[in-house]
Image (cartoon, rainbow, N blue to C red):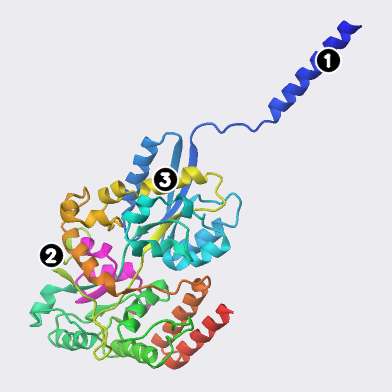
Amino acid sequence: MKTIRSIMFVLIALVLLASVVGCQPKQPAGPVTIRVLTMEQAGPTVDEMNAIVDEFNKANPDIKVEIEYVAYDALHDKITTAMASNPPAYDVFLGDDIWYAEFGKSGYALDVTDRVTKDMKDKIFPSAWDITTVNGVAYGMPWLLDEKYFFYNEDMLKQAGFDAPPATWEELLAQSKILKEKGIVEYPIVWSWGQYEAAICDWVILLYGNGGSLVDDKGAPAFNNEIGVKTLNWMIQTIDDGYTNPASISYVEEDVRNVFSQGKAAYAVNWNYMYDLVNFNADESQVTGKIKMSLMPAFEGSGVKSASINGSMGFSVAATSPNADAAWKYVEFLTSEAIQNKYSAHLLPMWQSSFEGENLTKLQGYTPANAVTVPMFNEQFPYAHVRPKVAYYPEASKALQLALQEALTKQKTPEQALNDAAAKWVELAK
């Protein structure tokens, strides 16, 4: 009897053990997959980003990175939609500096403050940390240090009798008048004034270059004051006078690049990536070797020497990613000094040592374009302005985009359009 009971006890124990073992979660087969969302315009090319992914995958066989590209204007909504699911559709995403207040408040981006090393803090430009940091909390690694630049076709200016680019917007219009009268170009300047974030960037350049600002020292909208109205009226007048390409009211940056590359404009405002493509890539441009860059003009009497827009970005780990450690490992690799130096042809490194002494010319991605864009970056960046870092910025921006479009298309007066946008900003801030 004891023997039977003993056998039964052993059998029951084995059954229980098998049940426990069977309930254990199965270990995933193969490497952990990290899904990355980024954009396909500005900064490194798709080929360069794919090469970085390949390097990481080879060096980390236990992690597999898969990358997806979208246009900038689709990036924000793609991120917010992805973060609504658990787990999220992406483990890593590229974020604009204007979104980090929202991403932090909404819990989309992982707090990586404790993961940021002293070496990162000490060696990366302090201004770069302003991109991904909100109220002292770091929500990612800085990535793309960029600002808008002033481009001009030196050949066209020489044909018109000018030895130097304009230092003020008034001087640009005076030069434009001669360019048109001599039949050198029909519309001297092209802008990104379509109803997108691109228009806000150009608006910041002109508004701050006229002594204005988006908000006052208390954070209240200030763009609808006398300076703002005057600046918007100036934009409209340049279209009416035939100096600004009228299609600018529907353009984004790539449209500007295409028009400028075809030799259909003497001046353009755009990001760093355009210089290499228009001046050194004959497959992309009809004006190679003719393009120069100079300090962004400002308005006479404004007391401002120059003004541009800070368009920097960062890479973040999704706060609810089940693979946060592996995702962070990729972000560290992607933003490391070695990788940024190697792929620097279309991306200015955020590491201060990359710009010291002879280090710049030793960059593996060094191109003739760097010899111009890097000094220009250092000259222009002190005059670059950031947009307000508030959680409601996406909605606020859409209201201002609409206002600019309504004024540029003469659906509303500049005063009414800007006042309506300012009222919306006040409502959103409540």
- x then y, percent, for residue 25: 64, 33
Label 3 environment density (alpha carbons within 10 Å; few <14, some 14–19, many ≥20): many
Please state which amino acid type lies under the numbered disc 1. Answer: Phe
Q: In this view, does 204 lie above or below 57?
A: below
Mark positioned earlier in the residue sequence (2 or 1): 1
- x then y, percent, for residue 189: 24, 79
Residue 285 appears anywhere in the view? no
Q: Name which residue lies at 25% across and 54% down.
A: 353
Q: Is residue 304 above or below residue 21?
A: below
Query: From the viewer's perspective, is 212 left or right of 259?
Result: right
Please state which amino acid type lies under the numbered disc 3. Answer: Tyr
Q: Name which residue lies at 32% across and 89% down.
A: 234
Q: Name which residue lies at 23% across and 61% down.
A: 277
Query: From the viewer's perspective, is 67 left or right of 369?
Result: right
Query: From the viewer's perspective, is 383 left or right of 360?
Result: right
Label 1 environment density (alpha carbons within 10 Å; few <14, some 14–19, many ≥20): few
- x then y, percent, for residue 304: 27, 84
Please state which amino acid type lies under the numbered disc 2. Answer: Gly
Choose top left, top right, bottom left or bottom right for residue 217.
bottom left
**Count of numbered circles in the view:** 3
Distance from Cα at disc 3 to Cα at disc 1: 51 Å
Examine the structure image and report whether residue 394 is included in the region drawn in magenta.
no
Query: From the viewer's perspective, is 347 left or right of 79?
Result: left
Q: Name the residue under label 2.
A: 289
Mark positioned earlier in the residue sequence (3 or 1): 1
Highlighted range, magenta:
248-277
Q: Mark 1 points at which residue?
A: 9
Q: Mark 3 points at which residue?
A: 330
